[in-house]
Image (cartoon, rainbow, N blue to C red):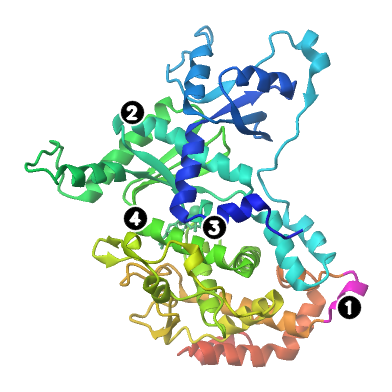
């Protein structure tokens, strides 16, 4: 059940860049068609095939039925576009932008009804946590529970196609201004840790333009474009995003709720893309963020336990309010994932290599220096030796909670480049080194109460995994193992929880205070009544 299909194995062996390039190309050959609830799938495909060979297709529900159709060649899209009508201006006055989003209607629904059947719909969101917990309770052991969660939550092949299509549709707009620009996804859509329903982080890339400039400079003379010069790169980014944001707002079919957040550290435009159903964050080329997506991609591909552990911990963190879908003082999924990678580097033997080790394996083509930072690391997965570590996932999950439940956050920071704790360079409660921009803390936003909450819930979870009797819980028909961790504490069995807190309360709080080495230990003890 958990074996990778051949197609997946093939995808995994490719480098991050190869996968990205292939998927972006496929997205350019793709159209999205809104369909009636019932239709004759065969006839629709037959009609579309008259414009070219169809590589793949699927149907999904998102405010009505949609079909994603991927052709084998880009010309087929143009041929189809030529044959498609423009809505009459009788009711609405339309903006005559020809996108790759179409609506398909039956001319004579009544007479055509006999041929119509409901189509198979590919799910684009994960099952609710309640349903997940029930599934987990039927598993054999905690490791299987973790793989079940991964299977239910991870992005599907279809959902990934839809994410790349959303980027490609935005590119149709950016290309109107910058013909060489590409819009690429980054973050959890591509780093192997994305969950169904997560936002699409996309960035506008002008990379090809720069490549072009370097080749031109090789000749005996120099020619360069006359370009508008601005006092800062940030200002250029803000201007570009502002115009593209307006463009999507005014002319983009199905682009709604456009919010320009141009004064953020990393300026961006947020919008919802209704045809695909995604919330999107569009920024301008951030090479370092892409490098961290690639690094996580490599870690996620190296060993099947990595993704299983990340999905379980992310889900656990969300249930307990340790992470949140809106930005704030809590730990982000990105920071949490980095903490898990660090933990896996610290196993004996390590499950994943440190960034410095990946850098040693890099060859010439892997060399990347961005803004003065050396971001080189190996891109070819086959060069990385598989780990000798054979620990099971249940051990890793329990030890993860114990490790961070006892981590000396007051003194130490988390450094994935070295794979070891380093003295904190400044006093942020949680310090995780940006692996590439070594003077940045990726978890600077986290405040002391949020960190304390994380530590307390991690300890409670370690305790549950160690102490609870699976057989007894199964007899009582209570959630066990991972399922027990996915119910907010205090809700599953309030009276039991209270007793447990009585029994271990003082011990837990004392060791919590020890590990945090709070100065105001007395006042906290008073506050909890000990
Ligand atoms: N990023 C970064 N430094 C940060 C925050 C984010 O470099 N302090 C980069 C990372 O590459 C990250 C990407 O921006 O993957 C997108 O950020 P975000 O959407 O917050 O994280 P995701 O990894 O996409 O996770 P989620 O599923 O929560 O969206
Ligand atoms: Mg994201």
Q: Quadrant of the N terminus?
A: bottom right
Q: Quadrant of the C terminus?
A: bottom right
Q: Residue 272: in sight, yes or no?
A: no
Judged from the image, the secondary structure of the residue bearing numbered disc 3 is helix
User: Which residue was labeled with disc 3?
Assistant: 13
User: Which residue was labeled with disc 4?
Assistant: 287
Nearest to the observer: residue 3 or residue 400: 3
Q: In terms of sequence position, does the residue under pointer 1 or pointer 4 come before the other?
A: 4
Q: Of discs 2 and 3, which sits in the foreground?
A: 3
Question: Residue 478's spot in the image, x, y percent?
Answer: 85, 70
Callout 4: few (<14), some (14-19), or many (20+) C-alpha neighbours within 10 Å?
some
Q: In the picture shown, does residue 149 fall above or below 7?
A: below
Q: In terms of sequence position, does the residue under pointer 2 or pointer 4 come before the other?
A: 2
The residues bearing labels 3 and 1 have C-alpha atoms spaced at a distance of 41 Å
- Asked if marks 3 and 1 touch (Cβ < 8 Å), the reply is no
Magenta extent: 469-477
Q: Of discs 3 and 1, which sits in the foreground?
A: 3
Q: In the picture shown, does residue 29 fall above or below 229?
A: above
Q: In terms of sequence position, does the residue under pointer 3 or pointer 4 come before the other?
A: 3
Residue 273 as seen in the image, left or right of residue 311:
left
Judged from the image, the secondary structure of the residue bearing numbered disc 2 is helix
- Asked if marks 2 and 3 touch (Cβ < 8 Å), the reply is no
Judged from the image, the secondary structure of the residue bearing numbered disc 4 is helix
Nearest to the observer: residue 377 or residue 517: 377
């Amino acid at each position: 059940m958990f074996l990778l299909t051949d197609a997946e194995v093939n995808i995994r062996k490719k480098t991050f860049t190869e996968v990205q390039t292939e998927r972006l190309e496929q997205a350019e050959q793709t159209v999205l068609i809104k369909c009636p609830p019932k239709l004759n799938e065969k006839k629709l495909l037959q009609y579309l095939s008259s414009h070219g060979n169809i590589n793949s297709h699927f149907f999904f529900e998102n405010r009505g039925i949609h079909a994603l159709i991927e052709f084998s060649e880009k010309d087929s899209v143009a041929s189809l576009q030529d044959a498609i009508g423009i809505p009459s201006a009788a009711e609405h006055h339309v903006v005559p932008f020809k996108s790759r989003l179409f609506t398909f209607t039956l001319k004579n629904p009544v007479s055509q009804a006999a041929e119509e059947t409901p189509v198979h719909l590919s799910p684009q969101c994960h099952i609710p946590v309640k349903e997940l917990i029930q599934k987990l309770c039927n598993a054999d052991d905690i490791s299987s529970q973790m793989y079940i969660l991964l299977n239910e939550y991870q992005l599907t092949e279809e959902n990934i196609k839809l994410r790349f299509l959303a980027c490609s549709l935005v590119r149709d707009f950016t290309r109107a201004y910058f013909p060489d620009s590409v819009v690429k996804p980054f973050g959890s859509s591509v780093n192997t840790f994305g969950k169904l329903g997560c936002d699409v982080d996309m960035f506008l890339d002008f990379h090809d333009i720069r490549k072009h400039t370097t080749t031109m400079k090789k000749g005996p003379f120099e020619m360069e474009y006359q370009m508008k010069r601005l006092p800062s790169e940030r200002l250029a980014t803000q201007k570009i995003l502002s115009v593209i944001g307006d463009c999507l707002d005014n002319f983009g079919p199905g682009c709604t709720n456009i919010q320009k957040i141009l004064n953020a550290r990393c300026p961006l435009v947020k919008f919802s893309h209704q045809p695909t159903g995604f919330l999107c964050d569009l920024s301008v080329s951030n090479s370092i963020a892409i490098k961290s997506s690639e690094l996580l991609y490599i870690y996620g591909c190296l060993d099947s336990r990595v993704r299983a552990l990340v999905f379980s911990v992310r889900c656990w963190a969300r249930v307990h309010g340790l992470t949140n879908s809106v930005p704030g003082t809590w730990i982000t999924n990105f920071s949490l994932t980095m903490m898990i990678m660090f933990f896996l580097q610290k196993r004996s033997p390590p499950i994943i290599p440190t960034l410095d080790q990946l850098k040693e394996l890099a060859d010439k083509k892997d060399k990347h220096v961005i803004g003065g930072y050396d971001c080189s690391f190996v891109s070819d997965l086959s060069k990385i030796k598989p780990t000798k570590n054979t620990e099971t996932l249940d051990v890793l999950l329990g030890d993860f909670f114990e490790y961070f439940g006892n981590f000396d956050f007051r003194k130490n920071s988390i450094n994935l480049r070295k794979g070891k704790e380093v003295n904190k360079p400044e006093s942020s409660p949680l310090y995780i080194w940006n692996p590439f921009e070594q003077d940045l803390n990726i978890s600077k936003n986290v405040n002391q109460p949020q960190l304390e909450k994380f530590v307390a819930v991690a300890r409670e979870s370690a305790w549950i995994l160690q102490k609870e009797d699976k057989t007894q819980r199964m007899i009582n028909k209570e959630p066990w193992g991972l399922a027990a961790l996915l119910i907010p504490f205090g809700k599953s069995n309030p009276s039991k929880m209270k007793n447990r807190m009585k029994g271990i309360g003082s011990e837990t709080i004392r060791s919590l205070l020890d590990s945090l080495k709070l100065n105001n230990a007395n006042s906290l003890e008073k506050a909890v009544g000990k």
